[in-house]
Image: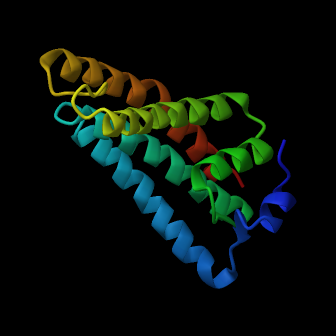
């Protein structure tokens, strides 16, 4: 496990000052909800963006938890660092697995895009065909129902704890 002190020394994490705390909490409280709403709104029409927005809802609520409960902000290598910090601070393995799965789906889409950039003509990602549209719609629905929504419920429960 990565120690929080090491991430602070490396500049990947920072402490949130009293003056910044309300701004961080306000921003991430709204951004995760905006991302979730966007993910649901584009589920049928733009399912890849639904997955991306769903992952960002997970990512942002995690950063809300870090700010509100631990007064930590992620400064560098934000996705990987956020997951490392979550694993260090939260012992719930189910929460850890959900964010890992969400991140892997997000990375898969990014890798698809990188591959498509290399091979524009024979891109191996969503092409707009009926089959791929239906496949991404199925994946996006599953992603929101099986990963995003359970994760948000679990993190919200942690946020409500005193």
Tell me if residue 151 comes above or below residue 2 in the rendering: above
Residue 142 figure quarter: top left
User: Where in the figure is residue 7, as x and y percent of width and height?
Assistant: 78, 59
Tell me if residue 31 comes above or below residue 117 in the rendering: below
Residue 100 located left or right of residue 48: right
Query: Which residue appears farthest toward the bottom when viewing the image?
Result: 19
If the image is split into quadrants, where does the N terminus sit?
top right
User: Where in the figure is residue 107, as x and y percent of width and height?
Assistant: 49, 36
Q: Nearer the viewer, residue 116 or 10?
A: 116
Q: Nearer the viewer, residue 114 or 121?
A: 121
Residue 33 located left or right of residue 25: left
**Tally of numbered discs:** 0
Query: Which residue appears farthest toward the top when viewing the image?
Result: 131
Name the residue located 63 percent from the left edge and 85 percent from the top edge. Answer: 19
Name the residue located 46 percent from the left edge and 37 percent from the top edge. Answer: 106
User: Where in the figure is residue 39, as x and y percent of width and height?
Assistant: 31, 41
User: Where in the figure is residue 118, as x and y percent of width and height?
Assistant: 35, 37
If the image is split into quadrants, where does the C terminus sit?
bottom right
Name the residue located 66 percent from the left edge and 44 percent from the top edge. Answer: 83
Name the residue located 26 percent from the left edge and 32 percent from the top edge. Answer: 47
């Amino acid at each position: 496990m990565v120690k929080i002190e090491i991430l602070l020394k490396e500049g990947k994490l920072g402490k949130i000052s009293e003056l910044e705390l309300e701004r961080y909490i306000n921003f991430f409280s709204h951004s995760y909800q905006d991302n979730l709403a966007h993910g649901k709104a584009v589920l049928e029409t733009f399912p890849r963006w639904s997955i991306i927005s769903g992952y960002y809802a997970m990512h942002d609520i995690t950063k809300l938890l870090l700010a509100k409960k631990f007064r930590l902000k992620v400064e560098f290598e934000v996705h990987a660092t956020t997951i490392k910090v979550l694993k260090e601070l939260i012992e719930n393995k189910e929460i850890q697995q959900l964010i890992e799965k969400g991140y892997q789906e997000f990375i898969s889409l990014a890798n698809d895009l990188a591959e498509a950039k290399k091979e524009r003509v024979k891109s191996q990602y969503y092409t707009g065909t009926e089959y791929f549209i239906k496949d991404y719609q199925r994946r996006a629905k599953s992603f929101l129902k099986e990963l995003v929504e359970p994760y948000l419920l679990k993190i919200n429960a942690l946020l409500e704890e005193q």
